[in-house]
Image (cartoon, coloured by chain):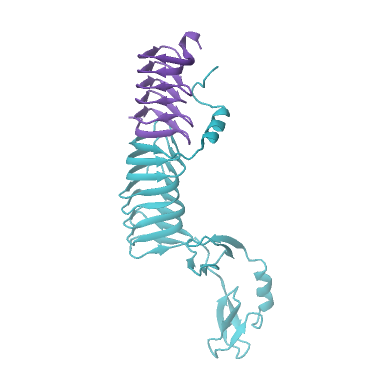
């Protein structure tokens, strides 16, 4: 979880009133006399300026428009410089019932007894130990760690189902890639890229779409499957001529 | 590999089922099933209209009737399988033309 912004005491240059501000504040209004002043006029400004020069920044991509911007490492929220969307940057944990939508740039943890009951929950990373009645989007990844259910479907970067965990999905799952080390039960799932089923993994589905599929020995899969025709004929030839491993390649 | 286990040659067509008891390579059009107790490669350009059964199967060509491997089944890019695929371990590369039922580890 992100650290809270540390506060410092500043004194109003007009009336001397002391109040607490973020140590990185640029300007503020005195809560006693309403005088507007910049941080450089407040006492301790030189110290703050020196501190500001060393602020750690991180890259942030807007979920709506995709604009990339830099924000302070410790920032809890920001606004997109392109589309103005409010970006909540922190993390959130759902331990019980949560109603209402969520959109985070940080991590969302849905605990073992948690249930996301909003229409849509979006986060950069989602750890699912409980249930979700609404739709989930894990932009980077969605990791299932418990005996979990998603009733309204999900999408995102990578879907990971850890060993010993299970996911039952009532609607479409749509991810860039997948790693199933536990159990997945669903209707239809689409993986644009690679889908890997580990030695203790299991998939029972109506239909799975994938870019490429690897089921390791010990893994179990029962479904209809379809590979995306993504690779051109030339790429396919190049791939084959590189020389293959595994079971006996053709000998001429 | 024993030359007798290589069913190959330009334009070879086999009108019936084929059985192999060693590792083998099929480079032909087979209008029937192909069965082997060992490793089997269906090479590029080959078409098997029936079912292919073997311990391990590497598919580079096309199989119409389905593939059943006791061990590993490998569909390389450019291969084509539009029916059932049974295996203990499975690899379907990007670029393989696959659509059908998958049964792995059952």
Above or below, A85 relative to A242 = below
Q: Which residue in the rendered view is the most extreme toward the front?
A: B11
Q: Is residue A106 visible?
A: yes
Q: Quadrant of residue A47?
A: bottom right
Q: Quadrant of residue A23?
A: bottom right
| Drawing shade for chain B | purple
Above or below, A73 relative to B11 = below
Of B105 and A43, nearer the camera is B105
Identify the residue at image location x=69%, y=71%: A50
Query: Quadrant location of the C terminus of chain A?
Result: top right
Q: Residue B67, percent across and down? A: 37, 25
Q: Residue A209, percent across and down? A: 39, 41
Q: Which chain is cyan?
A: A
B16 to the left or right of A49: left
Above or below, A9 relative to A52 = below
Of A151 and A54, nearer the camera is A151
């Amino acid at each position: 979880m992100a650290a809270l912004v540390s506060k410092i005491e500043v004194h109003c240059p007009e009336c001397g009133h002391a109040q607490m501000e973020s140590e990185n504040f640029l300007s503020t209004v005195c809560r006693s006399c309403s005088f507007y002043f910049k941080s450089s006029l407040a006492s301790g400004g030189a110290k703050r300026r020196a501190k500001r020069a060393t602020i750690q920044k991180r890259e942030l991509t807007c979920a709506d428009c995709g604009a990339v911007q830099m924000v302070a490492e410790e920032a809890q929220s920001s606004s997109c410089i392109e589309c103005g969307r409010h970006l909540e940057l922190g993390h959130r944990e759902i331990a019980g019932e949560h109603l209402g939508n969520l959109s985070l740039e940080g991590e969302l943890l849905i605990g073992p007894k948690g249930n996301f009951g909003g229409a849509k929950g979006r986060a950069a990373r989602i750890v699912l130990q409980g249930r979700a009645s609404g739709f989930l989007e894990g932009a980077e990844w969605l990791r299932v760690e418990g005996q979990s259910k998603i009733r309204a479907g999900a999408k995102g970067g990578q879907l990971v189902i850890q060993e010993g965990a299970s996911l039952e999905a009532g609607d479409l799952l749509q991810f860039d890639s997948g790693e199933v080390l536990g159990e997945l039960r669903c209707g239809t799932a689409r993986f644009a890229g690679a889908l890997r089923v580990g030695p203790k993994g299991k998939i029972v589905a109506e239909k799975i779409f994938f870019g490429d599929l690897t089921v390791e020995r010990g893994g179990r899969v029962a479904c209809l499957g379809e590979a995306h025709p993504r690779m051109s004929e030339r790429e396919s030839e190049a791939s084959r001529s590189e020389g293959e491993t595994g079971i006996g390649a053709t000998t001429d | 590999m024993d030359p007798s286990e290589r069913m190959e040659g330009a334009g070879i067509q086999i009108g019936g089922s084929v059985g192999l008891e060693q590792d083998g390579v099929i480079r032909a059009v087979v209008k029937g099933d192909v069965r082997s107790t060992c490793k089997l490669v269906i090479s590029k350009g080959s078409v098997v209209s029936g079912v292919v059964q073997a311990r391990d199967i590497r598919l580079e060509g096309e199989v119409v009737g389905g593939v059943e491997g006791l061990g590993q089944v490998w569909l390389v890019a450019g291969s084509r399988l539009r029916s059932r695929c049974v295996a203990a371990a499975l690899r379907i590369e990007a670029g393989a033309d696959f659509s059908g039922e998958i049964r792995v580890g059952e």
